[in-house]
Image: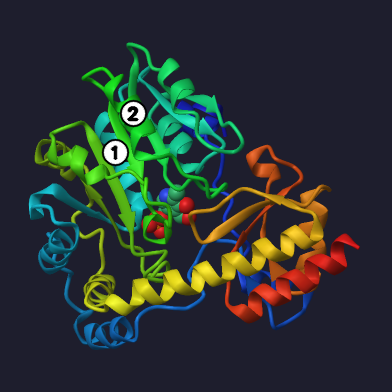
Amino acid sequence: MSEDFVRDSIHRLRPYVPGKPIEEVERELGITDIIKMASNENALGPSPRAIEAMRRALNDVALYPDGSCFSLRLAVAKHCDVEPDNLIFGNGSDDIIHMIGLTFLRDEDECVQGDVTFSQYETCAVLNNSCCRMAPVKDFTYDVDAMARLVNEKTKLIFIANPNNPTGTMVAHDEVQRLLDRLPERCVLVMDEAYYEYVERDDYPRSIEWVKQGRNVIVLRTFSKVYALAGLRVGYGIARREIIKYVERVREPFNVNSVAMAGAIASLEDPEQVARSRAFNSAGKRYLYAEFDRMGLKYSPTEANFIWVDVKTDSVQVFKQLLRRGVIVRTGDIFSAPTHIRVTIGTEEQNRRFINALTEVLA
Ligand SMILES: Cc1ncc(COP(=O)(O)O)c(C=O)c1O
């Protein structure tokens, strides 16, 4: 098949590397009792109210979902204190990143992102014949001034994952404000806040204020993390209505399914879900910090539900050894950090099992 069989950009795309699924490890290694601490899922699981609502929604799956997400839209608008037409919904926030690329990027436009960060921003740029300029992180934290220096007349999108994936670090309100104030009118700042409910610091950006001020900011949130609905795929974007109107034009008509909508609405009606998950995450974080300190391993302070830790040796080997002990984590090599791993904070038992396995592997 000749090279020009597909669009040029397809050749430049790097395939997404997901966390290894449990079933795959079972098949490959012939072991059971595996724990996955590789994809920043919420080990506590979804709200019981969400599960009940999803069961009820199954009765109607013969019908197409409400393409306008009417009920979910009202629920999220109330939750975020924005107008319903400030919202767009996606099949996960990944879907919205994809839509943003299709909406805004012309050939030769440029994007700016931190290096290292979530891979989908680069995918979005490359797919649309754009390129991503990478601002190196400082101590695994975004350097917003370095990002601002990469902005030029071709820059269209600036991506900030906050907290960042894979590092868990965050940038404060004033820092992002400084970047925003330096952006030309034609730029759109995408604040990807997939993990924002886990944040403990109080200087976290109040991004929705920028939307209300009419700035070119799109805030992304998801039901995959704190609400533990990753398998359902539902995320949303918040922006001024002029921006939303354009992005809506590229949205697939029924991109959010009816079971997901029911689960998401019921999750918002259970205030315990966030409180419970935050407390559980915070306790797990303190335990893992203490264990890493004991083992002499350096980690980045995390504001999310995962920790980026330097295991001081080849992370691929550590990953393989952990896998044999039934623990799946993520290696840093794909993020150009070959001695780092990223581990999702799990239940008390999972955290203990991970630490015991890591202690054995590093011994
Ligand atoms: C920073 C960041 N943004 C977006 C996503 C995608 O989330 P969703 O499940 O909503 O597509 C992830 C998933 O891990 C993420 O880490």
For the C terminus, the quadrant is: bottom right
Residue 31's spot in the image, x, y percent?
76, 80
Are there few (<14), some (14-19), or many (20+) residues within 10 Å of tag 2? many
Q: Is residue 338 left or right of residue 138?
A: right
The dot on residue 157 is 2
Q: CA distance from mark 1 to mark 2?
A: 9 Å
Q: Earlier in the sequence, mark 1 or mark 2?
A: 1
Does residue 363 sit above or below 340 in this rendering? below
Residue 36's spot in the image, x, y percent?
62, 70
Does residue 264 sit above or below 145 in this rendering? below
Q: Is residue 197 left or right of residue 20?
A: left
Residue 107's spot in the image, x, y percent?
35, 20
Residue 72, visible in the rendered structure: yes
Q: On the image, which quarter does residue 145 sit in?
A: top left
Residue 345, visible in the rendered structure: no
The total of numbered circles placed on residues is: 2
Are there few (<14), some (14-19), or many (20+) residues within 10 Å of tag 1? many
Does residue 172 sit above or below 87 in this rendering? above
Q: Is mark 1 within 8 Å of ligand 1?
A: no
Q: Residue at x 63, y 41 (%)?
A: 335
Q: Is mark 2 within 8 Å of ligand 1?
A: no
Residues marked 1 and 2 touching at CB (< 8 Å): yes
| Amino acid at pointer 2 | Leu
Residue under label 1: 100
